[in-house]
Each structure stands twice: as C-alpha cells, then as structure tokens.
Amino acid sequence: MAISPKVFEERSANPRKLAFQTRRNRPLLRTHTCGELRKEQLGQTVTLSGWVHTHRDQGGLIFFNLRDRYGMTQVAIGPEQGETVAEVARDLHQEYVVSVTGEVAPRPEAMVNRKMDTGEIELRPTSITLLNKSLPPPVIPAAVELPSEETRLKYRYLDLRRPEMKDTLLRRHRMVKGMRDYFDEQEFVEVETPILGRSTPEGARDYLVPSRIANGSFYALPQSPQIYKQILMIAGYDRYIQVARCFRDEDLRADRQPEFTQLDMEMSFVEMDDILGVVDGLVAHIAGLLLNLEVQLPLPRMTYDEAMERFGHDAPDLRYGMELVDVTDLAGESGFRVFENAAGSGGRVRGINAPGAAKGYSRKRIDELTEFVQGNSPAKGVVWFKVEEGGKLASPTAKNFSDQILEQIGQRLDAKPGDLLLFIADDFDVTCKALHLLRKRFGEELKLYDPQTMHFSWVVEFPMFEWDAEEDRWAAKHHPFTAPRPEDIEKLESDPGACRAIAYDLVINGSEAAGGTIRIHDAGVQQQVFKLLGIQPDQAQERFGFLLDALSYGAPPHGGIALGIDRWVMTFAGRDSIRDCIAFPKTQKATDLMTGAPGEVDDRQLSELGIELHKRPDE
C-alpha cells in the first residue's frame, strides 16, 4: 500500500514511534522501547517487549531488567501485582523474551539508579507474556567476564546483544551517516561500483570467483574501487564517494580483515591541498559528532622522510614525544666495535630516551625488551644505559666508551637521572623498525599519553617506489596509478628510488586511518610507470587497456583517498580489536565460526564451474 506524502512526512519526523503505530484494533507487543520511559510517563499504562537481562528473586519481591537495543527498564513485582504475575516472573531466566504491560511508577529514592537512563522509574506489571524461552546462553550479555573470543564469534547473535557491542555498532552507524551527510553537503554524489570485476594487481591477493558461463574465466572481488572511481572522474562525476565493501586475501591481524569497509572519495580538478582540506573538515565533523571534540584545523603535516627520521614509522603516534635521536657521528669515534662497525659501513646508530624508566626496568626486563626486538625485527640486539645521579651513563657496555663520548651521548638524548637510553646499530630501515617497536611499547608501559585523547595528522610525500628484493624489481609504494611529483617525473627513468609521489596518509593515534594519492591522468606517464614496475605493454593492455583508453579521452587531473571505516570505528570507540567493530567478522584464519564459512561445495557445483580440486602438498 502506498504511503501518502503527509503520513510519510509525519513518520519521518518521529521514526522511533513508527514501528509502534502500525497495528490497529490489535494489542501492541510494545508501546515504548526499554530505553524510553522517564518520570514524564509516570502513571501511564505501557507495554514493553525485550529480553530478560538480569533476574533477582528476593522472596516477596522479584526484579528483572528488560532490555532491547534502546536501553533497559527495571520491572518490579511485589504482592500487589498478584500471584498470577509473580508466578510467571519467577520462572523467567536470562535471555527469555517477554512482553510486559503495566504502570510506570517512581522508584523509591534510595533505589534510583543514576547509571541508567530509565533509573528513576520502574514498571509494575499487570501482565507478563512469555514470547520465547532461551537455552542457557554460552555468551551472557549481562556478564562482567567474557568467554573466549572463539565462543563469542560462534554465538555472535548472543554477543551482539551485549550493551558494549550495541554501543559500538550504533557508533558505527552514526559515523557512517555523519560521513554521508558531510559529503552530501559538499555536493558529492554516491555511486556504487561493481563487486564482480577483473583481477588487477593492487598489492594483495585477489579473491577469485569462477564464472559458470565462461568456464575457465574468473571475476575478482575488488580490493578497492580504485580504477572505477578514476573512470568516474573521466566520465565527469567530479565529486564521488562510496561506502564500499573491499576484499583482500592476505594474512590477518587485530586490525585487518579479509573483507572490510572503506569510504572512497575522488575529486577532479584538484591538487593535494584540496583533498586534505576536505578530509580535515570531515575529521572535525566526525570528532564533534561522536566525541564532542573540537579539532584545530588545518591538521598538522610532516613528510614521510621526517616521520621516519623522528619516529621510525610512517604512521607515528604523536600523543607523546620520545623521538629517535641519531648518534652515528659519535658512534664512529666511540671505541665500541658494534657502533663503529655500523657507522663505518654506512649504517646508523640511533636511540630513544625512556624517561624515568631506569628504576622500573631491571636487567631481566631489559633482556625481555631485547628478546622482543629480536623477535619482531631484524635487529641483532639493543645497547642500553641507565642514567645515574650526576648524569653518568651506566651499563655493562659503558666500559667500552670514553667518558667524553658518554657525556656527549647523554647530552644528545637530553638524559636526566633515572632515564633509560636504548640504541640500535644497523642500517636505517632496521633502526626504524626496532626503535618504533620500543617507542610504542614504552609509550604504553610508561603511560606517556592519555588513551582518551585523539591526535590527527598527515604524512605526505611518500616514496613512489620500493625495491622488492625477492622479485628483483621496483614495486609501487601505494598503487601503480599514483602520480609522481611533477619535478620527479624525469627520475622515473634515471633514479626511481628518489622519485616522490603525491601521496598522503591520515594518521590517528599512531594508526593509518586513510590513504590517498593524486592519480596519473596522462596515458603516457601511466605506461611509463607500468614499464618501470615490470608490466610489459601487452600485459598492461590486457589488464588495464580500458583505463589506458579512458585516459586518452580527456581525463581531468584527479585524486582521492580511502578511509578505513572499520579502523575509524575501532579508534573512535577505543577498541583494541577491529573484530569488535564489525557485526560478523572473520577470525585470524579468515573463517566465520558462526556459519562455518568457508565450507565445501558439492560436486555438481564444481562440475558446472569446470573446476576439479587438487589438494596442495602441504595438506
């Protein structure tokens, strides 16, 4: 039945009550939600429906909290409610589904719960209807201690009932809606791009989908809408966004999933500053919407080279200092062979100062730090000193240094009594990785920052390429469609390693939250980059011929960015795992414990697809 414009307008103005105004001449399963009632409804007769969250039988009095996604309301049954109601209430258990009709009454002053939105009232029922029972739940939404993550994922429908999970998913909803609203105001248009596309190299393995119609051919699930959004720019849709599902067949970790959601943005006739400016505004909008936080704009920026030099990482956590300090010049004159060898072979000797850590880190704990670094980086070891009273540096290796060099090292790192100094001597990349690990660990263990604070910044001017030793060729640092800085185009032939890209990453609290580039809009330059990456002209035509053709038909200058929505939610919600920010996530083995995916299919399906299975040797 069609909805009249007037009714549609009324329902849109008050969507919460829409679901409760559709039944006529029939008893309602609920007139209000479990989070809606306040003192203003005192004396009213209402009906609530939901799940039994907690249940307490105190003999003459029975209490239970009734929960739905809007909140909780306490239901109180005393002698005045009668034995019929009390008998039903006694037999209730956690996660039973019930409908309760009764009068909204004030709680006694001593029983008011300020932690609940409905804490000043309670429902005194005239009837309780059992809608459905529940087996003893393996995941109890009211429990303080949680079962294992495997259990939570297997019974995800129970885990999602927990208030913490509900709050996170509602935060995600508000964030995505806020993003769409912001871009709508900026005159962006949302366009959906295909899920079934062509396999193109974008840095990770594709998920492949066999074609039944064209046996032997495959679709690929998109790692991103990258090529399609560039095609949209060429088509004239100069401001595009999409909340896009993306897929990458890669090894997983706490903040990575095989299928994920990102907000893709692309703009035409822009330079880098235009895109960063739009995203700056988005950051301020979302931070204000979700955290009531005022963000100072423009967001600070640093180059990739500066980030690696000062922090050893291209997504530094700037909520605290502890910058890396170079002492290579001093190391070369130190008399300590490990330092001198690194300095003499073109390597670096760099260190960090862990303020006030000397007392709390025994020799055993420092050995544990060394094992941590060796187990997670190529570094061979850690050299350390404790700063004693008077500024003297003390450690088993101190005897290898002159007093003058030790004093200069202490001054270089601004050492104060009680500090702990740690050094890595190796090539630049190894010192970066090892000291970043130490810096991050000390930041957490020494509580050098408030975990409730948020810091947003940009890292720009990334290298265009990185050398792939296994493949013995250059690889794209971001993706093969990234534009080089105009002044570096001539280096594509002469010195690819020195070529810088017009690339930029948004960093939130030490995590990459978004990454983007200005794209190549000239077919000749694109072919030149393909050639440098080892993609021969015939391969380029086969894989990307449609893009090269499109670039030849008046492609405008364009660029964009992709924001990892799952990671944004994790950061804004203060979660440690991205799986807590997704309704139905996969495990670190890319499996769905609830449904059992991936699973086997029958021989008929395989036959239709022209596929014959062969087990790998390692299976």
Image (cartoon, grey):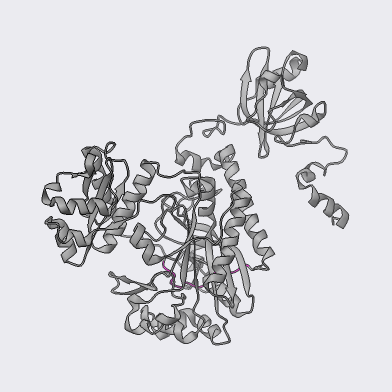
Between residues 457 and 585, which one lies in front from this camera angle?
Answer: 457
Between residues 133 and 343, which one lies in front from this camera angle?
Answer: 343
Furthest residue toward front: 390
Q: Position of residue 512 (x, y in %)?
A: 46, 58
Q: Position of residue 470 (x, y in %)?
A: 28, 69
Dominant SS in magenta:
loop
Q: Is residue 184 left or right of residue 470?
A: right
Magenta region: 192-203
Look at 62% across and 70% down and name the residue there. 240
Please give the count of numbered marks on the rendered protein. Answer: 0
Q: Is residue 522 above or below residue 134?
A: below
Look at 25% across and 39% down and name the residue there. 365
Visible residue check, residue 173: no
Q: Is residue 202 magenta?
A: yes
Q: Is residue 321 above or below residue 239?
A: above
Visible residue check, residue 563: yes
Q: Is residue 158 left or right of residue 125?
A: left
Q: Position of residue 412 (x, y in %)?
A: 26, 54
Q: Quadrant of residue 323?
A: bottom left
Q: Is residue 80 above or below residue 228?
A: above
Q: Position of residue 601 (x, y in %)?
A: 49, 56
Q: Quadrant of the N terminus?
A: bottom right
Q: Is residue 21 left or right of residue 464?
A: right
Q: Is residue 337 left or right of residue 322?
A: left
Q: Quadrant of the C terminus?
A: bottom left
Look at 50% across and 76% down and name the residue there. 519
Look at 48% across and 31% down and name the residue there. 145
Q: Is residue 487 magenta?
A: no
Q: Quadrant of residue 35?
A: top right
